[in-house]
Amino acid sequence: MGALDELTALAADRTAAAREWAAAGRPVAGYVGADVPVEVLTAAGFLPVRLTGDPDAPSDPGDRYLGRGLDPVARSVLTRLLDGAYGRLDALVVSHDCEASLRLFYAVRELHRTDPGIGLPPAHLVDVLHLPHRTTTRYVLAKIRQLRAQVERWSGAAVTDDALATAVATHDRVRALLGRVAALRRSRPARLTGTQALAVVAATTALPPDRAAELLEALLAEADALPEHGGTRVFLTGSSHDHPAVYAALEGAGLLVVGEDHDWGDLLHHRRVDPPADPALLELALAERYQHNGPAAAAASIRQRAAHTAAAAAACGAEALVSYVRVHDDAPRWDFPAQRATTGLPAVLVDHQPYGRVDLDALAGLRPRGAAA
């Protein structure tokens, strides 16, 4: 099995590595949101696994506690937690990246407190802010130190500075390699589809980081043997995608997703920690990485989003801009007019989309003539 096939298989079964990790008696921590400092979990011996929803499964249990007026991804994640779909989780860390994540955290924390028989893990909230101020940096630094203390209580052992430095270096290595992998779909012709690139990123969020780095290096070594891909080159903005269905539908219709600005794609890895020589400054460097990572739709200004989208779309050689906005995920809709104006590309807004589905008819003007609907 080639590296791409193995990564794609791991993206399809994102609990495979966690099952092996847990079987060896090691702890697994689920996490929600790209603002979670996974380096702290890795340094404590946890396997961090980013939790995903399932658009093909009913979310009735999650709807019961969160209501149907919330982003369906959060409702699906809670449903899967209640169903035990992620296997054994020793802890859960949730970032305050959006209102849906915050409400998910409160629901899990309360259910863990009031009904321990359900089997939900203990939960911790990480509140990372993204304002460009030194006071914000100090706030985020305090939150990272709180997470470190909580993880030490969960594990029963100190998170040493050496362990944290090693974890930071390993996760930075994964981010650097993901940046090189992203170039494979920006090339002309592309060596990866957007669907494949999304799967590669997803797999790395469910693997031990050293194993993820090994597979990414193997994939890069195989790059010249990968097939070439064509289609109308589109840059995807709007809601995030923890599932490949929308990408697969777009690319099945003749569009090639060469880049995106959501945190299951290029935004996840475009900024590294770059640890300082002085170990005493490592936590500060970590705080600055998470503070300045982005710009995500729920946390950045319209101007920041538009500037980032324009630069990223140009770097990808995009020929069109598609903004995909999921139902009950309202923030990206406000960004679209400025993104369209700043990129200068043919642009389409596909609004109020069901989780994991896309209205291809709205994209008819972008699809190559003769492409399947």
Image (cartoon, rainbow, N blue to C red):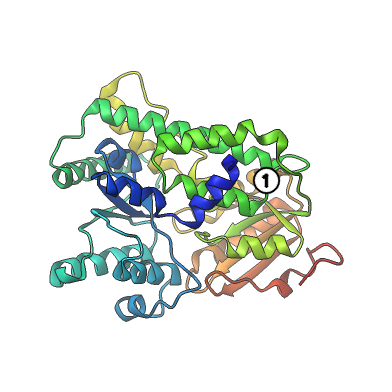
Taking depth in this image into account, of 118 and 9 the one nearest to the observer is 9
Taking depth in this image into account, of 18 and 187 the one nearest to the observer is 18
| Residue type for callout 1 | Leu
Q: Is residue 10 above or below residue 141?
A: below
Q: Mark 1 sits on what residue?
A: 192
Locate the C terminus by quadrant.
Answer: bottom right
> Left or right: 178 with respect to 367?
left
- Residue situated furthest right in the rendering: 369
Q: Is residue 358 above or below residue 153?
A: below
Mark 1 nearby-residue class (10 Å; few <14, some 14–19, many ≥20): many
Locate the N terminus by quadrant.
Answer: top right
Q: Position of residue 121 (x, y in %)?
A: 22, 60
- Asked whether residue 294 appears in the rendered view, the answer is no
Q: Residue at x 70, y 60 (%)?
A: 251
Quarter-wise, where is residue 209 in the image? top left
Q: Residue at x 74, y 59 (%)?
A: 255
Q: Position of residue 22 (x, y in %)?
A: 28, 49
Quarter-wise, where is residue 149 in the image? top left
Q: Secondary structure at mark 1?
A: loop
- Residue situated furthest front in the rendering: 1
